[in-house]
Image (spheres, grey):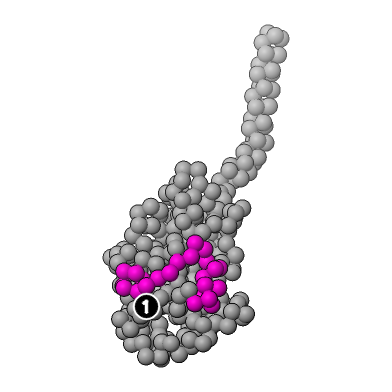
Amino acid sequence: MKQACLFLASRISRSVLLILTLLLATPFASAADAVQKTATIRYPLVSPNADPHVDYVLEILRHAVKASGQPYQLQASEVAMQQARAIYELTSPNGIVDILWTMSTDEREAQLIPIRIPIDKGLLGWRLALLRSADAEMFREVRTLKDLSAFSAGQEMDWPDVAILRNNGLPVKTSASYDPLFTMLKAGRFDYFPRAVFEIQNELDLRPSLDLVIDKHIVLYYPSALYFFVSPREPKMAQDIQRGLEELIKNGTFEKIFQRANQDAIKNANLKSRTIITLRNPFLSPEKMPLHRTGLWFRP
């Protein structure tokens, strides 16, 4: 009898010890799970000199991540990369970036996961011309696309704009990278450098020694959208960021950030006083764009 009681007591002690062990382990297991659930969103490293709207885009992305309710953290890649390299990294099974912001094309939307909210409200398609100061009045008499075709534009070779301009009959000279385009313009390698409304003043201010000016007479327009693109490796990440962006639109944060970053540039561009040269964009299907959501698009 005594042995039976001792055996039972021993069993009870082991059971109590096991229960206590499980209870004590539970908080630590939950903490470990939370750490595991935190994911990193890796984006291409760019500088404001190479991408004048990088600060604005990253502000939108940070707010969207926070609004998504998911424990993501943002991390820039260790090396800077151009668009073609970043797209390669997004499509590669072991790529080193997860997200990119760039002008949308049908090809890019087929390769990657597009988040179809134009984070620039379509401003990327409104282009002013950067000129040499000696040519400040070069476009005074330009009224049509045919008039403009007498002049050559400069662009980076992996930008979608190259194909858009050429498809509309406009001559284009290209550079393998962004920075040399300004000195190429200064040297007369091409006649004008089309830049987005929200880019051009900052780019001009950063290069006072080149003696360049912003044309006052025309504005190029073609349908476009600056989207976030997510790697096909990360469909849930894309859904989370989409949800965060929708929340920013709903609560007004998106519009506040957009206006703060762009209202001065839009005002200074004085678009209503310019001749609008409209171009086709055959590389982005209109039916894929959320054109029915009129609040997402800029109109002068």
Residue 278 lies in what quarter of the image?
A: bottom left
Is 19 situated above or below 69?
A: above
Residue shown at 54% from the left, 77% from the top: 186
Q: Is residue 187 magenta?
A: yes
Is 244 situated above or below 25?
A: below
The stretch in magenta equals 165-188
Q: Position of residue 269 (x, y in %)?
A: 47, 85
Around disc 1, counting alpha carbons within 10 Å, would you say few (fewer than 14), some (14 to 19), or many (20 or more)? many
Q: Nearer the viewer, residue 255 or 118?
A: 118
Q: Position of residue 23 (x, y in %)?
A: 64, 35
Is residue 122 visible to the viewer in this orientation of the structure?
no
Task: Decide if residue 71 is on the left or right side of residue 246.
Answer: right
Q: Position of residue 73 (x, y in %)?
A: 59, 54
Q: Amino acid at mark 1?
A: Tyr
Residue shown at 32% from the left, 64% from the top: 283
Quadrant that contains the N terminus? top right
Disc tally is 1
Is 246 situated above or below 145?
A: above
Residue shown at 44% from the left, 58% from the top: 229
Location of mark 1 (residue): 221
Q: Is residue 36 magenta?
A: no
